Amino acid sequence: MVSTCSVMTLKAYQYSISPNSEQQAQIWQHFNHNRGVWNRMLALKSRYYKVYGKSLSKRQLQDHLIKLKKRPAFAWLKQVNSQSLLATLNNLDTAYGNFFKGIAKFPRFKSKRSNWHSYANPQHTEVDFENGKVKLPKIGWVKAKLHREFVGNIKTSTVKISPSGKFTVSILVDDGKVLPDATTIEPEYAIGIDLGIKDFVITSRGKTYENKRLLDKQLHQLNKQQRILSRKKKGSASRNKQRIRVAKLHEHVANSRKDYAHKVSAELVSESQTTIFCEDLAVKNLLRNKKLSRHIANVGWSQFLEFLSYKMKESSKNLIRINRFKPSSRECRMCHSKHENLKLSDRTFECPYCGHTEDRDIHAAKNILRFGLEQELGSGSESSHAVKSTPESILDLTSGSAKGLEPALVGSAEAPSRTSVS
């Protein structure tokens, strides 16, 4: 008998906060001290591994931190929330472990010149929705724009500052809800989507979502402000003001892109289909194309798929990626022959063998649907019986995982919805 597990949801709610001058100084103190602990412990772990050939455990790092606090030269470590320092050690241990597992690069030292800073509070964060305040350990109550209320137990909070100088707090909440079981995969309620540059998303039903090209609309102003920034003296207050102007332009583009991705993904989830098939795109490899890298980065495929993933999961629907090496653009969906001479500039697919003619992107989306059904239901998928999908098929986008296939590992999605298995 196959054992089942309940999948609990942890949701993150991000709010803008407005600390006063004293609280800002305390927050910066947390940024700096946590960065110092990260860099010192990373150097210690690296030296220890070079000498002894093994890594220091998280417990050993915690014991070393306690010893440092007793020294007069490190009395500054007592000025910040001790739990935040332990969270930094935990993050370092995770980053180090991911490197040896081959799923991440070696952790880097953090620079004080970086414009992104953050620290975490594993405990003792409180929210007052009536008065619009958030209580942070060692800092106290901070004014916040609490635009969304939540019900549940607060697990952690993370305080951040963006390059434009805006403070935010991200609160991870356990709402106690269990994810619904995944629905069945039925051909009549499944669609394929093709992600492109000319159009953002194209569905196998012929519906297209335009590419807003949000960065292109701000390029002229960005170029102008960047030229002004390049002429400013390094380290001057004038340069810092100009840097913030440039950061705000980039932030506006990023927020617009994020908003559009949320709207498109929400519309796709709200429609009648219960299964969406998409390509397993290697976006990092595609970004190596010098002619298309800016356009690919501008469209935001990875972010869109993350948003679509957690929305489909919460709606008990399936988002499944097909093999990235399937020739969705070049293979004729009618005679299944390959059009080897198809160019990127050819916007209409014309099969040289059977003469089938169709819009290139819609044709690719229909092929993605066909490949996906074959992957999940086998050959002759148009007449196959629906197969019940496991919860993992929604969470993991790297392989098809209908019941009977090898289950995939549960992965985390975008910040608003992360998962843990209990």
Image (tube, grey):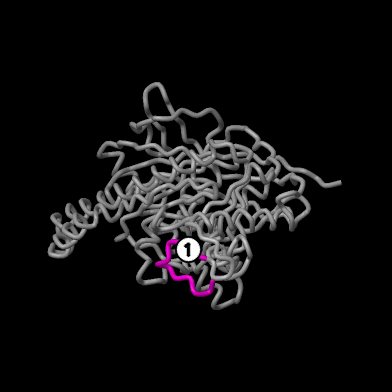
In the rendered image, residue 140, in percent from the top left (x then y), is placed at 38, 34
In the picture provided, is 190 more to the left or to the right than 351? Answer: right
Question: Residue furthest toward the bottom?
Answer: 51
Secondary-structure class at tag 1 = helix
SS assignment for the magenta stretch, majority: loop
Q: In which quarter of the image is residue 59?
A: bottom right
In the picture provided, is 75 more to the left or to the right than 224? Answer: right
Q: Work out whether residue 319 can be spotted.
A: yes
Report the span colored magenta: 339-350
In the picture provided, is 129 more to the left or to the right than 362? Answer: left
Q: Work out whether residue 83 can be spotted.
A: no
Q: In which quarter of the image is the C terminus?
A: top right
In the rendered image, residue 239, in percent from the top left (x then y), is placed at 16, 58
Residue at left offset 67%, top offset 46%: 187
In the rendered image, residue 174, in percent from the top left (x then y), is placed at 57, 36
Question: Residue furthest toward the right?
Answer: 1
The residue to which callout 1 is attached is: 283
Residue at left offset 49%, top offset 39%: 266
Residue at left offset 43%, top offset 62%: 347
Look at label 1 and name its amino acid.
Val
Which residue is more in the foreground, 168 or 296? 296
Which residue is more in the foreground, 371 or 149? 371
Question: Is residue 408 rendered magenta in the image?
Answer: no
Assess disc 1: are there few (<14), some (14-19) or many (≥20) residues with their C-alpha within 10 Å of its C-alpha. some
In the rendered image, residue 72, in percent from the top left (x then y), is placed at 39, 56
Question: Is residue 340 rendered magenta in the image?
Answer: yes
